[in-house]
Every structure is written in C-alpha cells, then in structure tokens.
C-alpha cells in the first residue's frame, strides 16, 4: 500500500513523505541478513499488547453504565475501582515474561525469530526482543484513597458492596476468599476475581487517619442505617436493583447514589494525570 501511494503521490505531498518514512522503517534491520525489520517486530508487539490488554479496557472506558443507561458515557465511576483490580490482574499476567506464554503474542514471537542474535542489546538484535518486558507501576493512588473509596457502596457486585461496608465498620474484618463474576466487557464475557484480593488491594494504602475519614465521609454517614442493613443481610442486596431489596425499602439510598455518585465523571484530568 505504501509503495503504491509513494508512486502515485507528488514527491512533496504529505502522504508521499509519510509513506516514504514507513518504507524506510520497514526496510531497517538489525543486520542485513535478518528476515524481520526491527520496526515490524515492534509493531507486532504493539498489536499483541493491544489485543491482550489495552483494547478491551479502552472500549470499556467508553461505555455507558448499564444501570444509569444511555447517555451515561464517562459516568462509570462507581465501577472503576473494581475494574482497575481486573486490569491489574491482567497486567500482572503479562509482566515478568508472562506474555511469552500468551498466544496473542505469537505474531511477535514469529517476527523475533527472524532477527538474529547480535551479542549487544543496543543493536536491537534478537536478545533485545527476547528481553523485552512489560513493566510499570500500575494504578496510582487516586482510585484507592479516602475521597474515592466511599463510592464502593455502589460497586458493580453486591458482595463487593457488602464486604466493603463490613470493612468500613471494622477494618480487621475477615473478608471471604471467594471468586465472583464481573461483567464489564462486551456481551456475556465474564471475568472472575477473588473478592478478598480485590478489596484488600483497594484499601491496602489506607492509613489510620484516612480510615477515620472514610468512616466519617458524608455519603457513608447519610446512609449509615441502610449500609448496616446491607452489611448484615444474608442475601445479596444491590442498592440500585429494587428486585434484590426483599422486604426493605432502599429507595432513599438509591436516590442518593443517583444524585451523589452518578454525576461523577471517570474521565477528567485529576484521574488521567497520574496514569
């Protein structure tokens, strides 16, 4: 495609410049005898990382909240903490060489096979690609701090809500180590997470002072009676789903969540700057 464009576009045109640069990149190899252009191998890495991690999560970030409905794009704040835990598990699975056993990286691995060892990482030979690692500090503290954690009373799974409230009442509570299903992606795709691991990760950075602040959070205090009922119930209660309320009336709590949490935008500079 690039060859055809370069042959048909004027030499000083923007498209001609771009395609000429692309052809140069796709011709550059670590060594003339290599079969794979270095740029091609790098592109295969980007495609694989997108398919294994980035694409589905970016698509999710652009969706409406299933409860708040059409027009709630960007207002998925109540689901972000649990989703970040899901992303962390995905990310951890690719780190420290985990990507090498992921079939989505097969195209990259085949591309690397066409790059010969050069004995020097700076020459971008086979060793450089073999030692490529996914590293990073995942999820800075914004979504796991005292001002944000109270939104977990409207989390996407009733058990996250219940045991977060239990933790608010008693920070030493024994959270059960059980698997729960989250439906964050398209269709019926389910992601299983460990309830205890999720909540413990979300609250692990909370200091004693911050814990006191969470307990006194206006949203927590306003709904203290309703939250106590949810925490003590043997049944799973979703404050946004009247069909789970049984004999209780949580309409006041539902209205407060709509007014206090639904308007919070997940996409804004305070969130995005630390990413």
Image: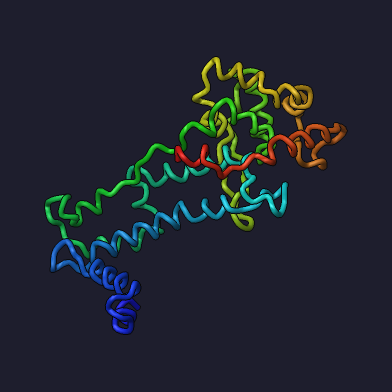
Q: Residue furthest front?
A: 12
Q: Which residue is at a point 69% across and 30% down the rendered structure image? A: 162
Locate residue 60, reporting x and y percent. 57, 52
Q: Is residue 3 above or below residue 118?
A: below
Q: Quadrant of residue 114?
A: bottom left
Q: Is residue 152 above or below residue 5?
A: above
* Quarter in which the C terminus is drawn: top left
Q: In the shown orientation, is residue 229 left or right of residue 104?
A: right
Q: Quadrant of residue 143?
A: top right
Q: How many marks?
A: 0
Q: Residue furthest bottom?
A: 8
* Quarter in which the N terminus is drawn: bottom left
Q: Which residue is at a point 61% across and 48% down the rendered structure image? A: 74
Q: Which residue is at a point 33% across and 42% down the rendered structure image? A: 96
Colour basis: rainbow
Q: Is residue 15 visible in the rendered structure shown here? A: yes
Q: In the shown orientation, is residue 210 left or right of residue 226?
A: left
Locate residue 213, reporting x and y percent. 61, 19
Locate residue 65, reporting x and y percent. 67, 48
Q: Quadrant of residue 20?
A: bottom left
Q: Is residue 236 visible in the rendered structure shown here? A: no
Q: Nearer the viewer, residue 254 or 23?
A: 23
Q: Nearer the viewer, residue 26 or 166?
A: 26
Locate residue 39, reporting x and y percent. 27, 62
């Amino acid at each position: 495609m690039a060859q055809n464009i370069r042959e048909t576009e004027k030499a000083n045109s923007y498209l001609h410049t771009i395609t000429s640069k692309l052809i140069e990149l796709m011709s550059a190899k670590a060594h003339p005898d290599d079969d794979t252009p270095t740029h091609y191998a790098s592109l295969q890495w980007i495609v694989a990382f997108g398919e294994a991690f980035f694409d589905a999560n970016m698509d999710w970030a652009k969706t409406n909240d299933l409860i708040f409905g059409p027009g709630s794009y960007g207002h998925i704040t109540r689901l972000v903490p649990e989703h970040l835990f899901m992303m962390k598990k995905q990310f951890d699975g690719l780190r420290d060489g985990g990507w090498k056993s992921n079939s989505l990286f097969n195209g990259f691995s085949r591309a690397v096979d066409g790059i010969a060892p050069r004995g020097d990482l700076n020459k971008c030979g086979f060793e450089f690609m073999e030692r490529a690692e996914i590293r990073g500090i995942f999820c800075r503290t914004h979504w796991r701090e005292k001002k944000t954690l109270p939104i977990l009373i409207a989390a996407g799974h009733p058990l996250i809500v219940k045991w977060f409230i239990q933790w608010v009442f008693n920070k030493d509570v024994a959270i059960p180590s059980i698997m729960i299903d989250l439906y964050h992606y398209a269709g019926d795709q389910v992601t299983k997470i460990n309830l205890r691991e999720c909540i413990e990760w979300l609250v692990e950075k909370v200091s004693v002072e911050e814990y006191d602040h969470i307990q006194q959070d206006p949203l927590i205090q306003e709904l203290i009676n309703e939250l106590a009922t949810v925490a003590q119930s043997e049944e799973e209660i979703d404050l946004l789903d009247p069909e789970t309320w049984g004999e209780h009336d949580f309409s006041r709590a539902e209205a407060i969540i709509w007014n206090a949490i639904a308007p919070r935008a997940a996409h804004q500079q305070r969130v995005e700057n630390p990413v």
